[in-house]
Image (cartoon, grey):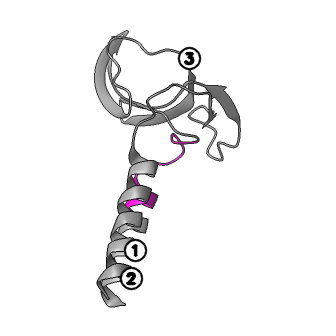
Amino acid sequence: MRQPLLCTLILTVYFTYSFAAPNAEPRLLTCKKCLANDTACRDTCVGYYCYKIEIEGAAKKAVKRGCLNDTDALSRVNECTLRKSQVGGLILAENVCICTSDRCNSSSNRFLPAVTYALLTALFGILS
C-alpha cells in the first residue's frame, strides 16, 4: 500500500516542478499575439519570452499579448510588475507579466493546470 502512494507522490512532485519551474536556458517560445480589440487572439509569434500587458486608465481596460527577445531592467521574468505612467493628462496602470513557456501568456493563471494535476494525483493516491 505504501509503494503506490510513494510513487504517486514522486510523480506529483516531478510533474508539478516540470510545469511550474522556470527554464534555466532560454529557448524560442510560441506565444499568443494580439491587441486589445482582438478577443479571439488566434495569432502567434516566436520569441525568448511571452508577455501579457493589462492596461487600465479612464475606466477602460485593454490587454496586449506578444513576444519579446529581451527584457528591460524593470521587468521580472515569470512574474508580473505593476507600473504607472502618465500619457497626456491620463494616468495609466500597466500590469506587465513576462513568462517562459509556450503560450504562457494566453491565460491569466499559467500554473493552474500543474496545480490541478498535482491535487488530483494526490487525491487519487489517498483514495486508492
Give the spatial CA distance, label 1 vs label 2. Answer: 5 Å
On screen, residue 37 versus residue 86, left or right, reads right
Q: Is residue 112 magenta?
A: yes
**82 to 111, vertically: above or below:** above
Quarter of the image with the C terminus in it: bottom left
In space, the residues marked 3 and 1 are separated at their CA atoms by 36 Å
Q: Position of residue 113 (x, y in %)?
A: 46, 60
Question: How many discs mark residues in the rendered view?
Answer: 3
Q: Amino acid at mark 2?
A: Phe
Residue carrying label 2? 124
At 37% from the left and 9% from the top, the residue drawn is 88
Label 1 sits on what residue type?
Answer: Thr
Q: Residue at x 64, y 39 (%)?
A: 38
Relative image position of residue 117 (x, y in whole percent): 43, 67
Placement of the N terminus among the 4 image quadrants:
bottom left
Q: Nearer the viewer, residue 112 or 14?
A: 14
Residue 108 in sight in this render: no
Residue nearest the observer in this picture, 81 or 3 = 3
User: Closer to the N terminus: mark 2 or mark 3?
Assistant: 3
Of label 3 and label 1, which has the lower sequence position? Answer: 3
Span shown in magenta: 103-115
Can residue 93 be seen by looking at this rendering?
yes
Q: Mark 1 — residue?
A: 121
- Residue at the front extreme? 3
Q: Which mark is residue 69?
A: 3
**Disc 2 to disc 3, C-alpha distance:** 41 Å
> Mark 1 touching mark 2, by CB under 8 A?
yes
Magenta residues, dominant SS class: loop
Q: Kindly indicate whether the residue at mark 1 contacts the one at mark 3 (C-beta within 8 angstroms).
A: no
Is residue 76 inside the magenta stretch? no
Q: Residues within 10 Å of mark 3 (few under 14, many from 20)?
A: few
